[in-house]
Amino acid sequence: MQAFTDRWEQGFAALYDNRELAEISWVTTSVSPALQQLVIDGVIPRGSEVVDLACGPGVHAVFLARHGMRVTGVDRSATALAKARELAGFYDCDPAFVEGDILRTPLPDGCADVVHDSFVYHNVRPEARGDYLREAARLLRPGGLFVLVGFSDRMSPGSGPIRLTSDDVVRPALEHFSIEELRRFRNLPTEKRPDQWHWLGVFRRR
């Protein structure tokens, strides 16, 4: 099954090959304040084994590695992974980066304490959500955390990812996870989207 929506496949999938990172709207120099707070509060403690799904050029993977996590980033774009390795070298840290499909990652069962999703799920086609969450659950040890950040239904209308309702996030997850936290938060503004309302979901593997 194809993981991502047709809009992603037809409009965005090749951008890493064809554009500079500065021209790609979702590539920023910082991670979300919600993820930072999870690290500050010790919800994601130092030493955690983290899998960063669809890691792109590695901003989140490098952030987590710099804060003491053992991180593996997975992405299907070899170009994005090359950029991620460059970024890791700049910050003198050593996350692993693996090319793979987010629905069938080349990683073993129960290899992670945390699976991290930054703006991935909101690009997953609805019929693939169950497969995606099943893969996240497979990667986690029992009791591990799945952390998700994505567009909420309070985001301004327009192009781009799916605006997710709470049901979109929660209902497919309940097969494998219990809910630790689900809340909307304001994320960093951009020129095109000055008022960004996103979800933070923290789910515990049963």
Image (tube, grey):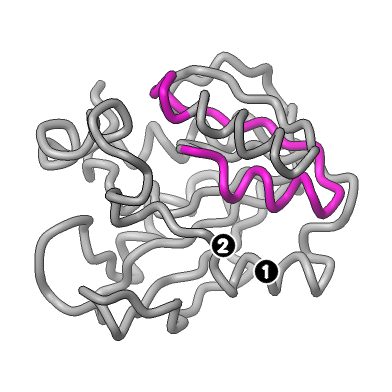
In the picture, measured across the screen, residue 112 lies left or right of residue 17, that is right
Tag 1: residue type? Gln
What residue is rendered at 59% in x and 72% in y? 34
Instruction: Please name the amino acid that badge 2 sits on.
Output: Val
Residue 73, magenta (yes or no): yes
What residue is rendered at 18% in x and 79% in y?
156
Query: Which residue appears at 55% of the width and 37% of the height?
Result: 136
Q: Residue furthest right?
A: 47
Compared with 141, 38 (above or below) is: below
Q: Which mark is residue 138?
A: none
Give yes or no for contact between labels 1 and 2 (Cβ–Cβ under 8 Å).
Answer: yes
Crowd class of label 2 (few under 14; some 14 to 19; many from 20; radius 10 Å): some
Q: In which quadrant will I find the N terminus? A: top left
Magenta-drawn stretch contains 17: no
Q: Badge 1: few (under 14), some or many (20 or more) residues near its Cα, within 10 Å?
A: some
Work out whether residue 34 can be spotted. Answer: yes
| Mark seen at residue 31 | 2
Q: Tally the marks.
A: 2
Q: Secondary structure at mark 1?
A: helix
Identify the image quadrant of residue 128. top left
Along the line of sight, the residue nearer the viewer: 58 or 87: 87
Residue 31 x, y percent position in the rendering: 56, 62
Q: Residue at x 22, y 56 (%)?
A: 161
Disc number for residue 36: 1
Secondary structure of the residue carrying tag 2 is loop
Residue numbers of the magenta segment = 57-80
x, y percentage for residue 120?
A: 39, 47
The one of 88 and 165 positioned closer to us in this rendering = 88
The reply, left or right, for residue 106 in relation to residue 44 is: left
Q: Is residue 174 above or below residue 151?
A: above
Could one spot residue 206 in this view of the protein? Answer: no
Q: Which badge, 1 or 2, comes first in the chain's sequence?
A: 2
